[in-house]
Amino acid sequence: MKLKVRLTLAASLVLSLCGMSHAATELVIATVNNGHMIEMQKLSKHFESANPDIKLKWVTLEEGVLRQRVTTDIATKGGQFDIMTIGMYEAPIWGKKGWLQELKTDAAYDVDDLLPAMRNGLSVDGKLFAAPFYGESSMLMYRKDLADKAGVQVPDRPTWPQIKDLAAKMNSPKDGVYGICLRGKPGWGDNMAFITTMVNTFGGQWFDMSWKPQLESKPWKEAITYYVDLLKNYGPPGSSANSFNEILALTNAGKCGMWIDATIAASFVSDPKQSKVADQMAFAQAPTMNTPKGANWLWSWNLAIPAGSQKVDAAQKFVTWATSKEYIQLVAKTNGWANVPTGTRKSTYAAPEFQKAARFAAAEKMAIDSANPTDSTLPKSPYVGVQFAAIPEFQAIGIAVGQQMSAALAGKSTVDAALKASQIAAEREMKKAGYYK
């Protein structure tokens, strides 16, 4: 009898140990297929070895598909993902709706080390709802050799008239060089990201305090007219189809005198392995016109945990690890300081090794620090966001307006007609959503 009891106890112990070995928590992580995120997947073996009770499963998607999948999942409480990669657009909207878990960080994480612009853009009522993995603003990247040849000293924070003057002097289509390259491809996060910052600095806004669209206002007309004329006279042919990747290729081939775009591009255009003019590239702040407010955008890719998640503790552990100072040190050790995810922490910019490896570091940090998502327009606005308005309706409005702006740039519409059609589309969406009658 005793032997039978012992055998039964032993069997129970074996079964419970087997159960424990299979009880590892699996975290399903939805992420975007860009370089920094692919690197995170490779390095996550370090996290798994330090946390053997947690297993990671990756769902890597193209940006448009990722947005669609995570938005559907969180809105329907699908529960497909334990951790989501979301943008600065979604974070405050979803946080306010109660769709995201508030992130609880410990002292070692050092939340005060996060750049204030990033922390504020991902918080609602002082609560952090997403952790920044990498961030960016926008800046002016230009060929110093062409500026020197034109006898122009580019200031740290140029004005739009100075940019126009320099574009005219640099422009030499017969030599395959265009004075300026800017986004023209339609999309709320594409041409409209750049155009919104231009409108901001001309003194415009998307909506007034009554949520009325302002697309036919004087600042919008002046900014869009300036933008269209600038690219028509000094931009490459086919600008209405150009986005980040097309302009990056043109810049690296030495065909753009100037380019105003995401600060993340600075590391590519200054890399001699990628750029023919790497040693000639110089950096300054995005241009201003009537106000410096909202002249350069603010964006980040972030990790967030859906509310109601059954695996909050494990998910919190991973989010903390992937967005920590230690993770940045790990990337630096593995791939070099020039390849760390930037735009998130003060300590990254304070590191002498990073300053040495990235000569754009000071200009990038200045751009990020100067962007304020809660005060990005000259007239008071009811929305949060620099190059977008953080309301659910903005995606549809931004896409419709982006198509009109691209048509004006391509000469298929006049600026006035494009803005009128944009105003009608925006009013229709806002009325339908009940913002006003």
Image: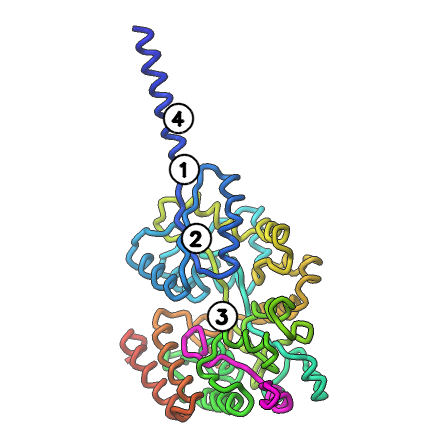
Amino acid at pointer 1? Ala
The residue that mark 2 highlights is 102
Badge 2 element: loop
Tell me whether the residue at label 1 lies in contact with that at label 4, contact meaning CB atoms closer than 8 angstroms: no
Q: Which of marks 1 and 4 is nearer the N terminus?
A: 4
Pick the quarter of the image with the C terminus: bottom left
**Residue type, numbered disc 3:** Thr
Mark 4 vs mark 3: give the one in front: 4
Provide residue 390's location: percent of width, then percent of height.
Answer: 41, 69
Circle 1 residue: 24
Quarter occupied by the N terminus: top left
Q: Compute the Cα span from label 4 to label 3.
A: 53 Å
> Is residue 157 placed above or below 32 in the rendered structure?
below
Location of mark 3 (residue): 374
SS type, badge 1? loop
For label 4, the residue is: 17
Instruction: Point out residue 303 in the picture as x, y percentages from the top left corner.
Output: 46, 55
Q: What element carries label 4?
A: helix
In this view, which residue lies farthest toward the top?
A: 1
Instruction: Name the residue: 29% across, 73% down.
Output: 433
Asked whether, in this view, residue 257 is left or right of residue 53, the answer is right
Task: Specify the segment rendered in magenta.
Answer: 163-191
Disc number lying in front (3 or 1): 1
**Mark 4 belongs to which amino acid?**
Leu
Tell me which numbered mark, 2 or 4, is placed earlier along the sequence.
4
Labels 3 and 1 touching (C-beta < 8 A): no
Circle 1 packing at 10 Å, graded few (<14), some (14-19), many (20+), is: some
Q: Which of marks 2 and 3 is nearer the N terminus?
A: 2
Report the mark closest to the observer, 1 or 2. Answer: 1
Residue shown at 58% from the left, 82% from the top: 288
For marks 2 and 4, give the one nearer the viewer.
4
Amino acid type assigned to the residue bearing label 2 in the image = Glu
